[in-house]
Image (cartoon, rainbow, N blue to C red):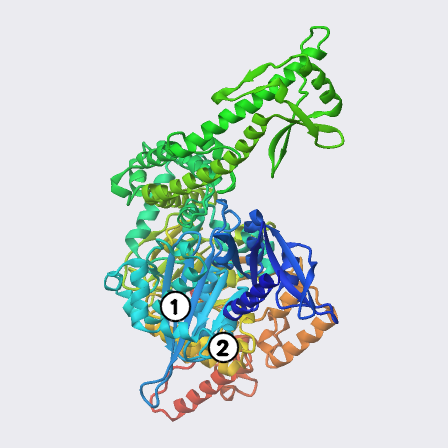
Amino acid sequence: MSTITHEYFNLTRDYKSKYGEHTIVLLQVGAFFEVYGLKNPKTGEILNSNITEFSQICQLNISEKNISMEGSPIMMAGFRDYTLEKYLQKLTESGYTAVVYVQEKDGKSVKRVLQGVYSAGTNLSYDTDSNQQISNNIMCIWVEKFKAIRNMGQDTFVCGIAVANIFTGKSSIFEYQLPYYLNPTTFDELERCISTYCPSEIIINSSTLDESVLAAILQFSGTRTQLIHKNGCNSSAKEIVDKCSQQKYIQHILATFFGEESTQVCAEFHTYNIATQAFCYLLHFIQEHNPNLVRKIALPLFSNSSKNLILANHTLKQLNIIDDASIDGKQNGQFSSVLSFLNKCCSPMGKRAFQQQLVHPTCTIEWINREYHMTQLFLLPKNLPLIPLFRKYLGELRDLEKICRQLLAKKLYPASVFHLYKSVELLEQLSICLAESGEITDYLEQGSPNGKNIGAITMIILNYINKYLVIAKCAGCQTMQVFDENIIQRGVSKDLDTLIDQYKENLDNFNKIREWLNNLMRTSENTNNSANDTDYIKIHTTEKSGNTLQITKKRASALKTILRGLGNQTVTLAGGMYFSVADIKSSSASTSADEIEIPCLDKICKSLLSLKDKINEKISEAYLMFLDNFEIQCLADIEYLAKYIARVDVLQCKAYIAQTYNYCKPEIVQHTNAFVKAKGLRHVLIEHLQKNEIYVPNDICLGNSVGGSQSDPTNPLGILLYGTNAVGKTSLIRALGIAVIMAQAGLYVPCSQFVYSPYSAIFSRILGVDNLFKGLSTFAVEMSELRMILRNADNTSLVLGDELCSGTETESALSIFMAGLMDLHRKQSSFIFATHFHEIIHFDEMRNLGKLVLKHMAVHYDREMDCLVYDRLLRDGPGNRMYGLEVCKSLYLPEDFLEEAYKIRTKYYPNARGELARPTTTYNSQKIRGICEMCKTEIGEEIHHLEPQKQANTQGFIGTFHKNHPANLMSLCEKCHAKCHHNSVDKEESITKTPPVSRKKTTKGYMVK
């Protein structure tokens, strides 16, 4: 035992240094997996392993062994060997890495060898139900800082990302580079990848940055992953990290997994060096844990593609496309994100494919239009009945992609083969339903192996399984070692068939002996000749001794009497075996029963026990051979079926949500500039979350679209959106962004009409995610994101903003905001900003932006109810600029507080006064000092006489009217008043008199000329 514990503690020390403190070694000892620790005699603390945490996670007891090491008692916890899978799942879900050592016989001695290393990202469970977890992604991030080539140049940050899904064998790599700044926007793309894939385990490497910087990068990226391995420039894994930077090792790894020509065929491996390094390290890491997990792994998908719509600045989270993993998000269930709500796929394959499409929208018009067309076909009246039928079938399918990985890893239970069999049968029925839908069938069956249709593929798989397995007996078989009955078809293994025949013969003989003895007892006790089927002889089974025959002591005495009356009678059995009555003996088995002893019975029982073990070995051997052959013959077909299911499921999902939620088919009009025209636009989530009022749809147009002139206000590049708090500005902006992403993911959209030319990038700046960046001010985050927008936006970009520059004082905010609008307008980007900056509309620069329009979300004051009423309709113009206090009033702030706030607002912001609060002029009580009648924007501070007072006579008349007649008085702001007097001076000095300022009635009301 001391040798075992020494070995255990040495292994624990080594693996903790390799994988971190959250590492536990599981050592097989006999029929148990055990964990050890040393108890400090003074403090009672258990050291040298994580046995305390292990027992808490697995809910196991810790017991003290009768041995000690260096004066410290050895503590132990453990579980039976056949429950390993159960406890591995618990440990990996808790963020632990479990190192499993199993025992193997080496002649007469037993040695312990590494069976595998299991962690959150490398644990492939045996189950085929992926409804709880549809993916298990492991991610390797490689970051490097490169010095500037020129003395005054900027250092460069390069980030390579590699992701592998253990459930499907699919992988992807991505790389980007930016000037090196340790701030949030530098890691936007990293944050997007982490949010998209939600890895259960992360490795982050660097040969130039230390672990403190790596920790900061992970903090900026907002990861919530429990298990993280940081390998900085000074880490213990430096040697492996350095090797992954060398071309010879990279080429060797890629050639090992994908063939010698992979580096020539896939030029991306050369183009994206850092991402390739990350991918190679990831392959090494997974292979080190479990080599079977990377068998036949697919070539990675290169995400650096111009075909994809770029979602920058946390767009996925800011538009609620994906869940932010917060507690609030989890409580909202399907309404926690757009993805959760729209992903109505029924199978794990479909759910994964739908998620991939929604979070990776495309710019490829041909693909998008094909998705629209297929959805439209599915929505035809003749095909509508297929949707509920397909949803029923698809909901019963198991995860075929995961089954493929289990097959490669030799972790496919017979019960899983049974589930595969039933799934393939359902697919066969599903394909029959589609037999008449020619165009849909062609779309779904694209890329079939050797041109085979679904019917032919399903038949091949079903026939192959039936040839080797008795499928009905596989249903409840959750093991590959111990079998209650034979699951292998006769003729597959001659040795197995022979053993089974021998077992049956021995079992028949065993049952014949028992029945013969039972009949003796029945005959002697049956005095009234009535039927008697009592079992006097019982079968007693133990794991060690197998089957024996037992009888109560009282009946044993009666049996002896009966046997003495039979003389030396002989009973013949099958296989040339026999016994005589004189051979039958009995011995005490317990206080109440005797065991029947017959030489041939003893031989039969031993044979049954021995044969059962041999049969188990042969069944296991035959089953593993079946898995090997099944992989060779059917793996490609099963992988194709998984893709087929994903296509069917995603298509029915798109049709289902379009029909259920009344979405419309988008229309693409190709144009040099991206644009969008949406009628009846709705927010995917809010229209269902809001139960108290009907959602108010809006029409919106953005971008320099086809047929629009440069000065057409109905065809703007950008919109400044005003409105009171809580009226729905941000919701409208989000609704637009969501609709564009849905459209470019091939989905119908929540509109009555949607015409657009695809965008290449969406940039968002919507408040509510600053908590990701601890230690940075809101303004710093805003400016970082604004820099990203200004550097990358072009005429195919959509910029969505909310309260830009809210983190600094007004003067700087207005200046920055105005400069940003001018830049986006010049680049002809599509943009919409929600703002409360009414001051900006008076800027001279603003008047020069011909393609920028002002809109507001309508709200009106109900005098009867004394409240604000939210109409939520998009209207022209900036609307009323003062409404914050009115919103506060609706939120029931104290009356005395509000009254004081109103006084302060009126004192310092006179423009805020309502029309009834305007003062009259001393010249004439009928004239109200209101808004400036020239510029119509500022408050009137002065009363100007159109015809100067000096022209009046002593009675105050100028010709026929009094100088203070309301029509001769004009309310002006200081700036306009000064301008009028300046013009008057000019007129007096001018030889040619200019026409006086006057007020004239027009068809549009009274105007000053």
- Which residue does the numbered mark 1 point to in the structure image? 278
Is residue 203 visible in the rendered image? The answer is yes
The N terminus lies in quadrant: bottom right
Amino acid tagged 1: Ala
Residue 389 picture location, percent across and down: 44, 34
Q: Helix or strand or loop: what does disc 1 sit on?
A: helix
* Three-letter amino acid code at the position of disc 2: Glu
Is 533 situated above or below 551?
above
Q: Residues within 10 Å of mark 2 (few under 14, many from 20)?
A: some
Looking at the image, residue 259 lies above or below residue 460: below
Question: Tag count in the figure?
Answer: 2
522, 487: nearer the viewer: 522
Q: Is residue 999 visible?
A: no
The answer to whether residue 533 is left or right of residue 624 is: right
Residue most extreme to the bottom: 989
Say which quarter of the image contains residue 853.
Answer: bottom left
Disc ID at residue 148? none
Q: Position of residue 584 (x, y in %)?
A: 64, 22
Where is residue 60 drawn, in percent x and y? 66, 54
Q: Which quadrant does the C terminus fall into?
A: bottom left
Q: Which residue is mark 2?
A: 211
